[in-house]
Amino acid sequence: MAVNALSRSVYSKVRPLLSASVDTLSVLSRDYHEKVIDHYENPRNVGSFDKSDTSVGTGLVGAPACGDVMKLQIKVDENGKIIDAKFKTFGCGSAIASSSLATEWIKGKSINEANTIKNQDIAKELCLPPVKLHCSMLAEDAIKAAINDYNTKKQKKSQN
């Protein structure tokens, strides 16, 4: 009986907090910059390509410390220009935003131009706090891994 009374007492104190109307966007905006929120709520270029396609490079990277996993794919034309990019990311809002922004930035660039994108540029654009810099590092690593995969496929194709 005492446990039941205690439960009712705790519930009566917690209930107003549970029923209070909380604006989710205002909670998110305290932790994330508006650019991160925009890319999180409206991610660009989500999806994937056929990884066996020789014009597609796939980069799969992860951060064991936080559990973020990022797959970024590029589709390259015969002139070495990235004509499309897709991503799938399992992670926080900053990881998703970093992936989304990275795909936007690399589309239309040559492989060499895309290879110059640095995590600091992504972090600066998204106004990432120091605790979220690993997300922009993952995006840079994913770009480089996708380019490396494409170059490996291209080299194998030319040898055959």
Image: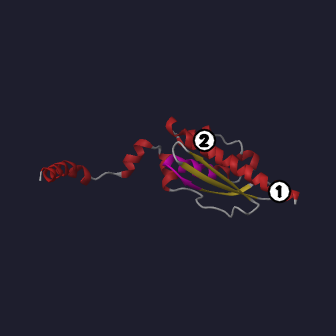
Mark toward the viewer: 2 or 1: 1
As shown in the figure, which amino acid type bears the numbered disc 1? Lys
The picture places residue 57, in percent across and down from the top left corner, at 71, 55
Q: Name the quadrant of the C terminus.
A: bottom right
Secondary structure, mark 1, is helix
Name the residue beneath numbered marker 1.
Answer: 156
At horizontal 37% and vertical 47% (from top left) the residue drawn is 26
Magenta highlight range: 88-104
Label annotation for residue 137: 2
Residue closest to the eye, 124 or 62: 62
Q: Would residue 74 be found to the left or right of residue 156 on screen?
A: left
Secondary structure, mark 2, is helix
Residue 100 drawn in magenta: yes
Q: Would residue 31 be found to the left or right of residue 96 on screen?
A: left
Q: Can residue 129 be seen by looking at this rendering?
A: no
The picture places residue 158, in percent across and down from the top left corner, at 86, 57
The picture places residue 31, in percent across and down from the top left corner, at 43, 42
In three-dimensional space, the C-alpha distance between marks 2 and 1, rounded to whole angstroms, equals: 28 Å
| Marks 2 and 1 in Cβ contact (< 8 Å) | no
At horizontal 78% and vertical 52% (from top left) the residue drawn is 151
Q: Would residue 80 be found to the left or right of residue 8 on screen?
A: right
As shown in the figure, which amino acid type bears the numbered disc 2? Met
- Mark 1: few, some, or many residues within 10 Å (few <14, many ≥20)? few
Q: From the image, give the main secondary structure of the stretch colored magenta.
A: helix
Residue 96 drawn in magenta: yes
- Labels 2 and 1: the sequence-earlier one: 2
At horizontal 77% and vertical 61% (from top left) the residue drawn is 54
